[in-house]
Image (tube, rainbow, N blue to C red):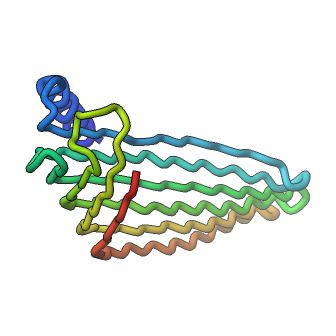
Amino acid sequence: MKKLLTVVLAAGYFCCTYAQQSKVLVEIGGAYRNTSTSNIVNENTTNSSTFKTPKLHTQVGIGVSSHAFLGFSYRFSKAAQTQLQETVYDQYNTIERNKNKFSEKINGFGAFYRYYVRPFGESRWNAFAELNPSYQKIQFSSDIRREYQSNDGGSNSLSNTVTTWKTDQKALDLDVKIG
């Protein structure tokens, strides 16, 4: 998160420094979503879940002609979801917990070429087409934990099951934009 904040601050500084020059194009966009839910299924079972998704997309380019910009792009997104289900059986003195964590992290590095129909800066409204190939590193991870605890007549029993997996993927992505 510190690296992400450093990149955003550096891009913002660069944007403010060259804000009056039309030969430099700096775009910074992003989104953040944080939701949580909790509900009672029945008198013994409760469910809760959280979902967080920060996203960042930046582009920095330099005018190569009066109609075109060429530059670099960076995308970051992360989706993290946690689900918890807890069931308590009072008459049997047992507790059953299921906790699932899933996450997906994407880093994309690329170049872009944007062509404007009219010369850039000539009017307020201008149409463009953009080609943006990028290389993406994608990381998936999952952590599933199941716990069963019983306190039956003075004897305690506890069983835990943990399943964890991670996978890394690499991909080439091509975006075509018209605006």
Residue in view at x 55 percent, y 41 percent: 34
With 19 as the anchor, is 154 left or right in this view?
Answer: right
Compared across the picture, whether 86 is left or right of 107 comes to: right
When the figure is inspected, residue 22 is found, relative to residue 134, above or below; the finding is above
Nearer to the camera, 97 or 174: 174
Q: Position of residue 165 (x, y in %)?
A: 42, 75
Q: Looking at the picture, does residue 11 appear above or below residue 38?
A: above
* In front of the other: 76 or 130: 130
Closer to us: 22 or 165: 22
- Seen in the image, is 103 located left or right of residue 91? left
Position of the N terminus by quadrant:
top left
Q: Where does residue 126 sit, x and y in percent of width and height?
A: 34, 42
Q: Quadrant of residue 56?
A: top left
| Residue at x 85%, y 59% (from the top left corner) | 89
Is the residue 32 above or below the residue 166 in the image?
above
Disc count in the image?
Answer: 0
Residue at 25% from the left image edge and 66% from the top image edge? 134
Is 38 placed left or right of 9 in the picture?
right
Provide residue 97's location: percent of width, then percent of height.
68, 60
Quarter-wise, where is residue 85 in the image?
Answer: bottom right
> Where is residue 137 shown, x and y percent of the image?
28, 67
